[in-house]
Image: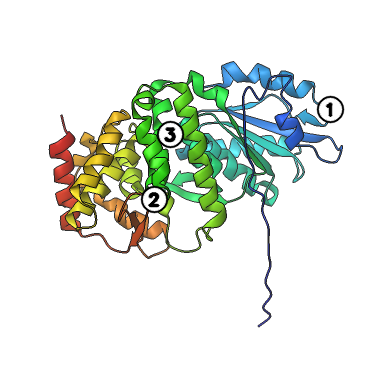
Amino acid sequence: MILREIPIAFQHRVVFTRNAFDSTNQTLLDLMRDDGNVSKVLVVIDDGIAESVSSSVIEYFAEAETLTLAGDPVVIPGGEPAKNAWQHVETIWQAIHDHQLCRHSYVIAIGGGAILDLVGFAAATAHRGIRHVRMPTTTLSQGDGGVGVKNGVNYFGKKNWIGTFAVPFAIVNDLAFLASLPDREKRSGLIEAVKVALIRDKTFYERIETLAVPLGQLDLEAVEEIIQTSAEHHVDHIATAGDPFELGSARPLDFGHWAAHKLEQISKFKVTHGEAVAIGMALDLLYSIEIGLLPIETVDRILKLLVQLGFQLYNPHLETKDSNGRPLVLQGLEEFREHLGGQLTVTLLPKIGEKLEVHEMNEAKVLKALGHLRARFHG
């Protein structure tokens, strides 16, 4: 056997700016300089913002000396259902091929988390990887998913069944996008901030509690502060926790997600990711009472915050049954196990600011927690 170490160092760059496509903003141009060479840029835009962004994108790159736009921006439907449509990946591949992009070109994705996942996968697989710049436009993607290194599309009815790990060339969080978000989307990213605070930083969690009222009212200054801090924590975890490509089975950033992913599927994604994570976290917190891991006072404190932030903690889709009469959401545990490589690892809280990985969930106690969730928050 010939054995050699192959050390690879990545730079994970997350830049915060405002109005990135304003002619006076040099952020993108400074990031994408390539020793004076002219690079092609393919831009893919979420259709929800295409009308307001496309002309600015075209004008911005028309004035750039070192970057040239490879045709008009490609517009893709946004939202999680887009990741169920394989043809969108092929559309991006076709544009990369038609415009003769190479590994020294750039693919920029502008949109929410679903668009970033989909475009990131297409960019990572064309020519074995084209330099990719993410521009998240939602609180959820700017504070969590958009600053990560995972890409994916749904397949076999399962979330992110096909995907890659690929560190983006850069992530540009343009805070100006957040101001125009519908309230539902503006709220969604707050739950991932609570999640990362709960598993990593009690001080950050207490800061969120302090801002609970303005956050619940979606005050933009408070939202921006929390999203920026959330992004920093997510990036720190990816860069310093020792397993950025998830070669192991522990995924602490997926606290509350085993039920959330399944709830999204059951509802055909009518329940948003943020809404589903809030419910999934509430379920795991109530389960923690059942197994004696958390005192009821701590759980009540956290659930109170989630309600203050405006989240509904129960959804009727939780009552959907499988052919054996069991709640369908329980299948999320087995799917989580499969996604992790065979060993179930679920993150729970022993206290605020700390995490604990467990490798089994007692079904009877999960069902009991589901009952408590329904009794407390249904109707």
Q: Residue furthest right?
A: 36
Q: Position of residue 17 (x, y in %)?
A: 63, 28
Q: Earlier in the sequence, mark 1 or mark 3?
A: 1
Q: Residues within 10 Å of mark 1 (few under 14, many from 20)?
A: few
Secondary structure beneath label 2? helix
Give me the residue at 40% from left, 32% from top: 188
Q: CA distance from mark 1 to mark 3?
A: 36 Å
Q: CA distance from mark 1 to mark 2?
A: 45 Å
Q: Earlier in the sequence, mark 3 or mark 2?
A: 3
Quadrant in the rendering for residue 108: top right
- Say which residue label 3 marks: 189
Quadrant location, the N terminus: bottom right
Q: Nearer the viewer, mark 1 or mark 2?
A: 2
Residue 144 relative to residue 215: left or right = right
Label of residue 65 in the image: 1
Could you tell me the amino acid type at mark 3?
Answer: Gly
Label of residue 155 in the image: none
Q: Position of residue 292 (x, y in %)?
A: 19, 58
Could you tell me the amino acid type at mark 1?
Answer: Glu
Give me the residue at 69% from left, 75% from top: 4
- Say which residue label 2 marks: 199
Secondary structure beneath label 3? helix
Residue 157 visible, this orientation: no
Q: Residues within 10 Å of mark 2 (few under 14, many from 20)?
A: many
Q: Nearer the viewer, mark 1 or mark 3?
A: 3
Q: Nearer the viewer, residue 229 or 73?
A: 229
Residues at marks 3 and 2 touching, judged by CB atoms closer than 8 Å: no
